[in-house]
Amino acid sequence: MQQMLDAGEVDVAIDELRWLLEGCSDLVRAHQLLGEIALTEGDLPLARGHFGYAFDICRAALPPGGLPGPLPYCLMENQALHESAKGLALCLDQLGNRDLARDVLREMQRWDPTDPLGAAAMLARLDGKPPPTKESSCE
């Protein structure tokens, strides 16, 4: 799928992703990619919908008592969740729902305290504060 997008075949990629979702509506990576495409095309409500759906799918799969440990971004299995959460926070911010954006960003920080996608910097920007210095990264 990424090869199609890299080659500029956005319409073909959208059709393929939608086809995949017909077979499995909870395919997180497909929603994340469709969210990215919609965000790039400036369709914030559609992007928010795809990112939010992916975010909700993953949160529903988490244990009700909280996480037994971190969800590191370094693991490929977690990347679509983290990227969807970041996209959702961006959309919420741009749509004027900064409180929900803050909630999403705080949750991202709990999932992976190394903050590989810059949730702390986004939170600081939302709060009108300077971004924190980043000491560690996902390796």
Image (cartoon, rainbow, N blue to C red):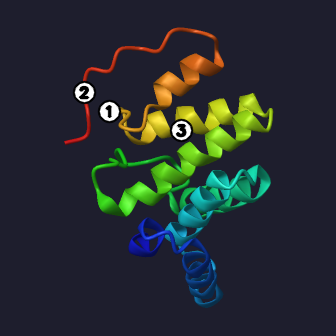
Secondary element at image label 3 = helix
Label drawn at residue 59: none
Q: Which residue is mark 1?
A: 114
| x and y, in percent, of residue 102 in the image | 64, 30
Q: Which residue is mark 3?
A: 107
Disc 3 versus disc 2: nearer the observer: 2
Q: Please say if 77 is above or below 39.
A: below
Badge 2 amino acid? Ser
Whether label 1 touches label 2, CB < 8 Å: yes
| x and y, in percent, of residue 104 in the image | 60, 39
* Viewer-proximal residue among 128 and 8: 8
Tell me which residue sits at (51%, 9%) in the image: 130
State whether residue 78 appears in this view: yes
Badge 1 amino acid? Thr
* Viewer-proximal residue among 20 and 75: 20
Residue 1 in the figure: left or right of residue 16: left
Specify the quadrant of the image occupied by residue 137: top left
Secondary element at image label 1 = loop
| x and y, in percent, of residue 136 in the image | 25, 27
Give the spatial CA distance, label 1 vs label 3: 13 Å
